[in-house]
Image (cartoon, helix red, strand yellow):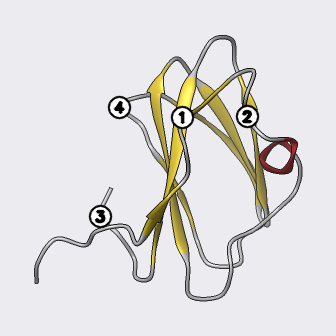
């Protein structure tokens, strides 16, 4: 089994450029996994089903399952990017 690479990545966003669509409830499509990678600072990831929160940091990425509703909230100065996969990635 080889390394799994993302098929697409978002631009790098900071606390000012993070789109409103990522700050409000959204989800990935069926068959799509997302990995939120914080490059600097911290970002709160809120899962809505089931409800839980985790603080992401450069050493702690966040996994989004296909169809899982969630949103993110910057915690001060930060930079982040989302990688998209068509199979479950190792994080």
Quarter placement of the C terminus = bottom left
Q: Nearer the viewer, residue 10 or 76?
A: 10
Q: Which mark is residue 18?
A: 2
Separation of marks 3 and 4 at Cα, in angstroms: 14 Å
First in sequence: mark 2 vs mark 1: 2
Mark 3, secondary structure of its residue: loop
Badge 2 or badge 4: first in the primary sequence: 2
Distance between mark 1 and mark 4 Cα atoms: 12 Å
Q: Which mark is residue 59?
A: 4
Label 1 sits on a secondary structure element that is: strand
- Using the numbered discs, state the Cα–Cα distance from disc 2 to disc 1 in whole angstroms: 9 Å
Quick one: SS at disc 4? loop
Tell me if label 2 and label 1 are in contact, CB under 8 Å. Answer: yes
Q: Earlier in the sequence, mark 2 or mark 3?
A: 2
Q: Residues within 10 Å of mark 3 (few under 14, many from 20)?
A: few
Q: For marks 1 and 3, give the CA distance.
A: 18 Å
Residue carrying label 1: 80
Q: CA distance from mark 2 to mark 3?
A: 25 Å
Give me the residue at 73% from left, 34% from top.
18
Query: In x, y percent, where is residue 72?
Result: 74, 41
In the figure, is residue 12 to the left or right of 48? left
Q: Residue at x 82, y 62 (%)?
A: 26
Does residue 65 sit above or below 59 in this rendering?
below
- Residue underneath mark 3: 90
The secondary element bearing badge 2 is classed as: loop
Instruction: Give the residue drawn at x 25%, y 73%.
Output: 4
| Circle 4 Cα neighbour tier, 10 Å, few/some/many (<14 / 14–19 / ≥20) | few
Q: Who comes first in sequence, dot 3 or dot 4?
A: 4
**Camera-nearest residue between 31 and 81:** 81
**Residue ranking furthest to the bottom:** 30
Q: Is residue 18 above or below residue 84?
A: above
Position of residue 60 measured from the top left corner of the image (x, y, whole percent): 42, 37
């Amino acid at each position: 089994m080889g390394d799994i690479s993302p098929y697409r990545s978002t631009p790098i966003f900071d606390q000012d450029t993070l789109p409103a669509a990522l700050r409000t409830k959204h989800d990935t499509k069926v068959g799509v996994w997302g990995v939120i990678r914080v490059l600097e600072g911290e970002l709160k990831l809120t899962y809505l089903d089931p409800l839980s929160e985790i603080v992401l940091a450069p050493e702690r990425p966040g996994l989004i399952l296909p169809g899982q509703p969630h949103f993110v909230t910057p915690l001060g100065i930060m930079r982040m990017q989302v990688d998209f996969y068509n199979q479950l990635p190792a994080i």
